[in-house]
């Protein structure tokens, strides 16, 4: 495993991280699945352990993943160990009707941070992210002041923003032009390279960059067929519909023909593409 500094921070992170959404297990917001279906906690724990054995020291989760269960698993296994770097996110919760509610008020962020610290069993969060906050939230300023306060209090070491999937430019520009935070998380993979100009700009300004959705919900592992289906408790049930799956797999055929030239799995090929690009930024 290779390691690198996360932007201008003192976090020395593994180039490959562990995305911990799926280990949160099934969760619903009303009738909308926000998890990955049924997951066995013992299997999830073994995956965390194996990742560490392979050199991964960076674990990215969110308080909304499994409605806190992902954080709990990481906390139960790693606790306050200083050789584990934990990133988590804030900004999504369920309202009184069990529907998704976006909350970037300062008071909520401070309260949610305390709850995440307890679940993670840590004294401080290494990297705390606003979970797809929009430009309006940033301009209001409450969420930014809360993150800065938490950093000054030592509750978090660094903070940043996980950017919107489809239109990351406005929020990225706001963060970069105002020199806010320490990093950005944005979608970047073989089939979605829209954020590359942002990555270049962020790197030039010393911001850390996390490539979000590197395997595009598993689509880039090569494990799906046009007949693959997902249970109603899996968010891919509505994101990877039969039509989207068929079109995507057809579009990926030329990519896989290139991958065949290399003696590695398709997942490794997809991750290698990202690393090859980002190492030169």
Image (cartoon, grey):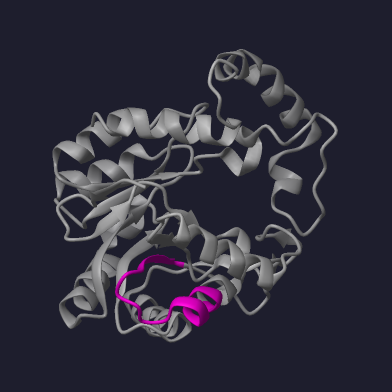
- The percent coordinates of residue 211 (x first, y second) are 40, 43
Q: Is residue 248 left or right of residue 121?
A: right
Q: Quadrant of residue 186?
A: top left
Asked whether 157 falls inside the magenta stretch, the response is no
Q: Residue 49 versus residue 173: which sits nearer the camera?
A: 49
Residue at horizontal 82 percent and vertical 38 percent from the top? 228
- The percent coordinates of residue 176 (x first, y second) are 19, 45
Q: Residue 107 versus residue 241: which sits nearer the camera?
A: 241
On screen, residue 250 above or below 35? above
Q: Quadrant of residue 144?
A: bottom left
Q: Residue 62 versus residue 58: which sits nearer the camera?
A: 58
Which contiguous range is marked in magenta? Answer: 72-91
Q: Residue 5 versus residue 32: which sits nearer the camera?
A: 5
Q: Is residue 200 left or right of residue 46?
A: left
- The percent coordinates of residue 93 (x first, y second) are 54, 71
Asked whether 79 falls inside the magenta stretch, the response is yes
- The percent coordinates of residue 9 (x first, y second) are 17, 58
Residue sticking out furthest to the right: 227
Quarter of the image containing the C terminus? top left
On screen, residue 57 above or below 266? below
Q: Quadrant of residue 10?
A: bottom left
Residue at horizontal 43 percent and vertical 35 percent from the top? 188
* Residue 31 visible in this rendered orientation of the protein: yes
Q: Is residue 22 left or right of residue 161?
A: right
């Amino acid at each position: 495993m290779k390691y690198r500094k996360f932007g201008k921070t003192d976090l020395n992170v593994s180039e490959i991280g562990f995305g911990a959404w799926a280990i949160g297990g099934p969760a619903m917001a009303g009738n909308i699945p926000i998890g990955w279906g049924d997951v066995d906690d013992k299997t999830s724990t073994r995956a965390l352990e194996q990742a560490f054995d392979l050199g991964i020291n960076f674990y990215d989760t969110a308080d909304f993943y499994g409605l806190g269960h992902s954080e709990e698993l990481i906390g139960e296994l790693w606790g306050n160990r200083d050789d584990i770097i934990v990133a988590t996110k804030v900004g999504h919760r369920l309202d009184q009707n069990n529907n998704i509610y976006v909350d970037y008020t300062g008071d909520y962020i401070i309260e949610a941070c305390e709850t995440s610290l307890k679940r993670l069993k840590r004294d401080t969060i290494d990297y705390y992210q606003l979970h797809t906050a929009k430009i309006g939230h940033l301009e209001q300023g409450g969420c930014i002041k809360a993150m800065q306060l938490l950093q000054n209090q030592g509750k978090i070491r660094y903070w940043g923003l996980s950017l919107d999937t489809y239109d990351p430019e406005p929020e990225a520009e706001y963060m970069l032009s105002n020199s806010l935070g320490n990093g950005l998380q944005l979608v970047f993979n073989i089939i979605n390279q829209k954020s590359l100009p942002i990555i270049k700009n962020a790197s030039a300004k010393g911001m850390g960059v996390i490539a979000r959705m590197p395997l595009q919900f598993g689509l880039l592992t090569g494990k799906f067929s046009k007949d693959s289906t997902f249970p109603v408790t899996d968010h891919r049930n509505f994101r990877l519909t039969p039509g989207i799956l068929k079109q995507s797999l057809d579009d990926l055929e030329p990519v896989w023909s290139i991958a065949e030239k290399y003696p590695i799995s398709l997942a490794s090929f997809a991750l290698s593409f990202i690393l090859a690009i980002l190492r030169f930024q």
